[in-house]
């Protein structure tokens, strides 16, 4: 029984994707939008309310990071997988970059692009 639990813990831990791994991924999207950086960042964070979203604004540098995590909870505890990283920077015009976990389906890219466009119109 203990061996089975140990194997399951290793399997579950293997599914976790740390933020640092996503930071190393290539930028998949770069877009410039005609909205302020803080409003764009707040909107993007709110757009992913089905996930654990961390909004990290740095007002003095007019930039923010939005980290989108999927948290799975089971009998053996919780596993956090960083799915996306948005980096928002600008003033009244904002540049947004987006990185994703390399194992995610390409459809998430289309979804991210649509959300950036929508939040850029706020």
Image (spheres, grey):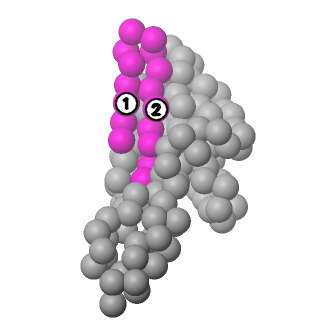
Local SS, label 1 = strand
Q: In the rendered view, would you say 6 is above or below 48?
A: below
Residue 118 location in percent, x, y? Answer: 52, 43
For the residues marked 2 and 1, what is the alpha-carbon distance in whole angstroms?
5 Å
Residue beneath label 2, please? 65
Q: In the rendered view, would you say 57 is above or below 83?
A: above
Seen from the viewer's position, the closer of residues 60 and 101 is 101
Residue 4 location in percent, x, y? Answer: 40, 86
Seen from the viewer's position, the closer of residues 4 and 15 is 4
Contact flag, marks 2 and 1 (Cβ < 8 Å): yes
Q: In the rendered view, would you say 36 is above or below 67?
A: above
Q: Is residue 116 visible?
A: no
Question: Dividing the picture into quarters, in which one does residue 31 lie?
Answer: top right
Q: Please identify the quadrant where the N terminus is shown.
A: bottom left
Local SS, label 2 = strand
Magenta stretch holds residue 61: yes
For image coordinates 33% across by 84% down, the residue present is 2
User: Which residue is situated farthest in the top direction here?
Assistant: 60
If you read the primary sequence from the N terminus, does the residue marked by circle 2 or circle 1 appear first? 1
Q: Point out the stretch of residues depicted in magenta.
A: 54-69
For image coordinates 36% across by 36% down, the residue present is 55
Residue beneath label 1, please? 56
Q: State whether the magenta stretch is mostly helix, strand or loop.
A: strand
């Amino acid at each position: 029984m203990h061996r089975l639990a140990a194997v399951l813990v290793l399997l579950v831990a293997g599914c976790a994707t740390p933020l640092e791994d996503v930071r190393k991924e290539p930028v998949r999207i770069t877009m410039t939008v005609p909205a302020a950086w803080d409003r764009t960042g707040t909107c993007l964070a709110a757009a992913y309310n089905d996930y654990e979203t961390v909004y990290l604004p740095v007002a003095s540098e007019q930039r923010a990071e939005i980290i989108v995590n999927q948290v799975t909870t089971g009998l053996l505890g919780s596993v956090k997988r960083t799915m996306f990283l948005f980096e928002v920077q600008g003033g009244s015009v904002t540049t947004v970059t987006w990185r994703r976990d390399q194992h995610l389906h390409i459809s998430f890219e289309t979804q991210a692009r649509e959300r950036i466009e929508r939040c850029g119109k706020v």
